[in-house]
Image (cartoon, grey):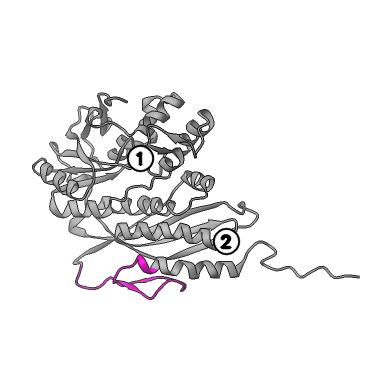
């Protein structure tokens, strides 16, 4: 009687050798995204980071975890994987900086159906680039192979970031005052939110090809959708160092008003003027092709505003000058007023967008 072949991990779909090869390919990228406080390198069981004594008097650690969402489906469809890592870093570190925290390090998690070392390397190259842009270290992570649960070419990514802020320098709702001014920091497009609706409208309803040239964009639809998220961390820290910033709001899922409400105290309302800016063409295209109502657009997409700073009225000009010098599009979006109803909305959009 013939014996059945011995079962192996590789036959079950997990290639340890490919995983080891992927780790070797990742090391140069992690080496590029580092800081002086990093102790050791990538490949151990845990990453080490030294909080050098003396730099902070009363340090508070801040932590944030996030992913990229269904934007990954566009990357997979185009077989282009070197930019979604930038989106991942942006989603994490720009949540940290809202508190005034400086991002220190990030650890990623990549789940794949099958480890293809070159694809994993492309993903991590984007993560490393995002960390460089944010000024934080890539302190390692995990690549997990999930045969039988994910298709061979499927993957998902997430990350956790850690930052630090002096207890005396924490930003937030308790600092906001009537008369404060709301400044918008422009986005680079959709960023990493609302892609389920965007894909449904543009790909399913309008049946637009990802490789097709779109006149309004001056490039293909796929190139527009994969435009990396702007990373604001260094810009926000520079602004907070030069001006009296009360708080920031990272405009992600839920839209402009809902995210700004999270950093507004009870009894005050941020009045925002839609006439202050024109959203990028991609937002108009989605609205028109999908017949998406304005309220749905504004609670799904950032509409061209990726971050908001609330500053003292005396520092508006200084704030705009700092951001302009750093090549960040910025404009006055509105102001903070006493609310007629203390239990009502804490952020309201008024007026209409020009040419939208």
- Would residue 296 be found to the left or right of residue 324 on screen? right
Q: Do the numbered discs 2 and 1 sit on residues whose CB atoms are within 8 Å?
A: no
Please report the bounds of the magenta region as a residue range: 31-55
Of the pair 119 and 44, the residue shown nearer to us: 119
- Would residue 84 be found to the left or right of residue 54 on screen? right
Asked if residue 139 is positioned above or below residue 127 in the image, the reply reads below
The answer to whether residue 183 is seen in the rendering is no
On the image, numbered disc 2 is attached to which residue?
A: 115
Q: How many marks?
A: 2
Residue 264 in the image, given as x and y percentages of width and height:
24, 40
Tell me the element at label 2. loop
The residue that appears at 36% across and 47% down in the rendered structure is: 229
Tell me the element at label 1. loop
Of the pair 156 and 66, the residue shown nearer to us: 156
The quadrant in which residue 331 appears is: top left
Confirm whether the magenta stretch covers residue 46: yes
On the image, numbered disc 1 is attached to which residue?
A: 189
Confirm whether the magenta stretch covers residue 20: no
The quadrant in which residue 147 appears is: bottom right
Q: Quadrant of the C terminus?
A: top left
Residue 273 in the image, given as x and y percentages of width and height:
22, 29
Please name the predominant secondary structure of the magenta segment in the image. loop
Residue 78 in the image, given as x and y percentages of width and height:
51, 46
Q: Quadrant of the N terminus?
A: bottom right
The residue that appears at 52% across and 28% down in the rendered structure is: 205
Disc 1 packing (10 Å; few <14; some 14–19; many ≥20) = many
């Amino acid at each position: 009687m013939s014996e059945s072949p011995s079962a192996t991990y590789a036959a079950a779909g997990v290639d340890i050798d490919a995983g080891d090869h992927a780790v070797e390919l990742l090391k140069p990228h992690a080496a590029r995204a580092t800081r002086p406080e990093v102790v050791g390198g990538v490949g151990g069981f845990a990453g080490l980071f030294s909080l050098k004594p003396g730099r902070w008097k009363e340090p508070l650690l801040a932590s944030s975890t996030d992913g990229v969402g269904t934007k990954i489906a566009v990357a997979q469809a185009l077989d282009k994987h070197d930019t979604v890592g930038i989106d991942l870093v942006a989603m994490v570190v720009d949540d940290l900086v809202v508190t005034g925290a400086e991002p220190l390090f990030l650890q990623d998690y990549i789940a794949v159906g099958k480890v293809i070392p070159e694809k994993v390397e492309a993903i991590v190259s984007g993560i490393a680039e995002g960390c460089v842009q944010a000024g934080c270290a890539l302190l390692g992570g995990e690549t997990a192979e999930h045969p039988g649960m994910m298709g061979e070419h499927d993957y998902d990514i997430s990350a956790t970031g850690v930052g630090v802020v002096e207890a005396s320098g924490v930003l937030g709702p308790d600092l906001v005052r009537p008369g404060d001014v709301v400044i918008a920091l422009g986005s680079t497009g959709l960023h990493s939110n609302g892609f389920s609706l965007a894909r449904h409208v543009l790909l399913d309803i309008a049946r637009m090809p990802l490789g097709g040239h779109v006149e309004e964009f001056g490039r293909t639809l796929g190139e527009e959708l994969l435009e990396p998220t702007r990373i604001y961390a260094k810009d926000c820290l520079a602004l907070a160092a030069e001006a009296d910033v009360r708080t920031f709001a990272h405009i992600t899922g839920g839209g402009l008003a809902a995210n700004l409400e999270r950093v507004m105290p009870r009894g005050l309302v941020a009045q925002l003027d839609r006439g202050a800016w024109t959203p990028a063409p991609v937002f108009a295209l989605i609205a028109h092709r999908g017949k998406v109502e304005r309220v749905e657009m504004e609670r799904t997409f950032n509409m061209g505003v990726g971050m908001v700073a609330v500053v003292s009225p005396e520092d508006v000009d200084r704030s705009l000058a700092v951001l302009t010098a750093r090549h960040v599009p910025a404009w006055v979006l509105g102001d903070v007023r006493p609310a007629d109803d203390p239990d009502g909305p804490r952020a309201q959009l008024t007026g209409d967008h020009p040419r939208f």
